[in-house]
Image (tube, rainbow, N blue to C red):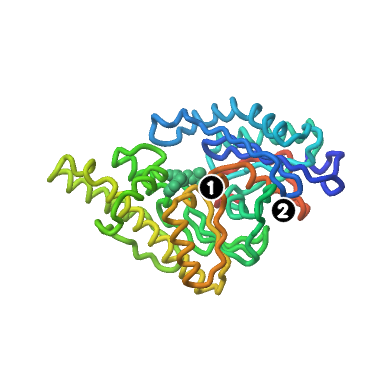
Amino acid sequence: MEAGIVSRSFENMADYILGIESSCDDTSAAVLKDGLLLSNVIASQQVHKDFGGVVPELASRAHELNIVPVVSQAVAKAGIKPSDLSAIAFTRGPGLLGSLLVGTSFAKALSLSLEIPMVMVNHLQGHVLASFIQEEGKEYNPPSFPYLCLLVSGGNSQIVRVDSPLDFEILGQTIDDAVGEAFDKCSKMMGLGYPGGPVIDRLAKLGDPDRFKFAKPRVPGLDYSFSGVKTSLLYFVRDELKKDPEFMEKNKEDICASFQKTLIEILMDKLVKAARQTGIREITIGGGVSANSGLREAVLAEGRKRGWKVHLPEFRFTTDNAAMIAMAGLFRLRSGERAPLDIAPVSRIADF
Ligand code: KG4
């Protein structure tokens, strides 16, 4: 059965679109009216904190508990009734399959009961298009096409060329770990907790970024690698701790500052190269790691030097949120796309 059989037509109505995001450990729902954000509710799962990472089984269970109240709140905060909704956009993947199943199944049920169409969204494309979300009383300054997006999160590190809201080309990506994974794993190794990015970011502000040097990868083209720098930090800390068991505690600010600086330099080298190769000067960043203060400063500084027009996302749109899913979904709906009711979520980007 196709969602296209539903009686209400997206094109003929005010576009109240509900976004649903459940790819990892945040249950989120948002409502957009013609691209203007009316609500964005996020329930972050605390249950993973003691495990040093997201536990897939626990994530799916928490989504199942959260999804109904989160969607209800998003609709209520938007000041509309469920029957005012004209379409639903949901994250199809990539992500944790059990988590994605909760959002996808909920979207199908709601689509059937409200008799409205639904559209699937690639989570990563949501991050890449987050700069198009409009907010009441805030300046609207989206990038012009074509633009480059440095997409950096716990699962991905990519440079994406965006030619239209529907045309994406991955110019480079990590061949091993994602940069967020490097932040998280190294933080865990240093006993600083999870997620590692925010802690390292905070401690880095207090330290000397030039004190320690870590190995940088030599990867051809525009691809990234972060496993080597992670290992470099691991061996360095292990060797220093043999000499002084207090080394970590005494030097954690400098270690974090130096490690973060290395990660940012790796990211920026390839972004600069991509901009040079393509001649594109409209630059955005997205994904959880785009909240990093050092990275944001580095992109702005490089932009000033090279005449780029830089678009930094609002902090609340850097991590997983349904507003960006609704935004990406709106573009897809307007292009005529619809998801059939037998659509299944996918865990890997290669399956899109
Ligand atoms: O996009 P995201 O919320 O989730 C997925 O990857 O699905 O990204 C999470 C990642 C984690 O690795 C986290 O450590 C990192 O974003 N992160 C940061 C910062 N805030 C979150 N990394 C560096 N600096 C930050 N301020």
Tell me which label, 2 or 1, sits earlier in the chain: 1
Which residue does the image show at 42% across and 36% down from the upper left? 53
Mark 2, secondary structure of its residue:
helix
Which one is in front, 73 or 179?
Answer: 73
- What is the distance, in whole Å, between disc 2 and disc 1 at their CAs? 22 Å
Q: Quadrant of residue 23?
A: top right
Q: Of circles 2 and 1, which is in front? A: 1
Q: Position of residue 320 (x, y in %)?
A: 55, 43
The residue identified by callout 2 is: 331
Q: Residue furthest front?
A: 137
Neighbor class of circle 2 (other Cα within 10 Å; few <14, some 14-19, many 20+) is some
Q: Type of residue at label 2?
A: Phe
Residue 27 picture quarter: top right
Residue 177 placement, left or right of 308: left
Q: Residue 346 location, x and y as percent? A: 58, 43
The tag on residue 315 is 1
Residue at the image point whose x is 59% and y is 65% from the top: 147
Q: Residues within 10 Å of mark 1 (few under 14, many from 20)?
A: few
Q: Quadrant of the N terminus?
A: top right
Q: Secondary structure at mark 1?
A: helix
Which residue occupies the foreground of this view, 18 or 223?
18
Could you say where residue 107 lies in the image, as x and y percent from the top left? 69, 36
Q: Are marks 2 and 1 in contact (CB under 8 Å)?
A: no
Q: Relative to residue 65, is residue 332 depicted above or below?
A: below
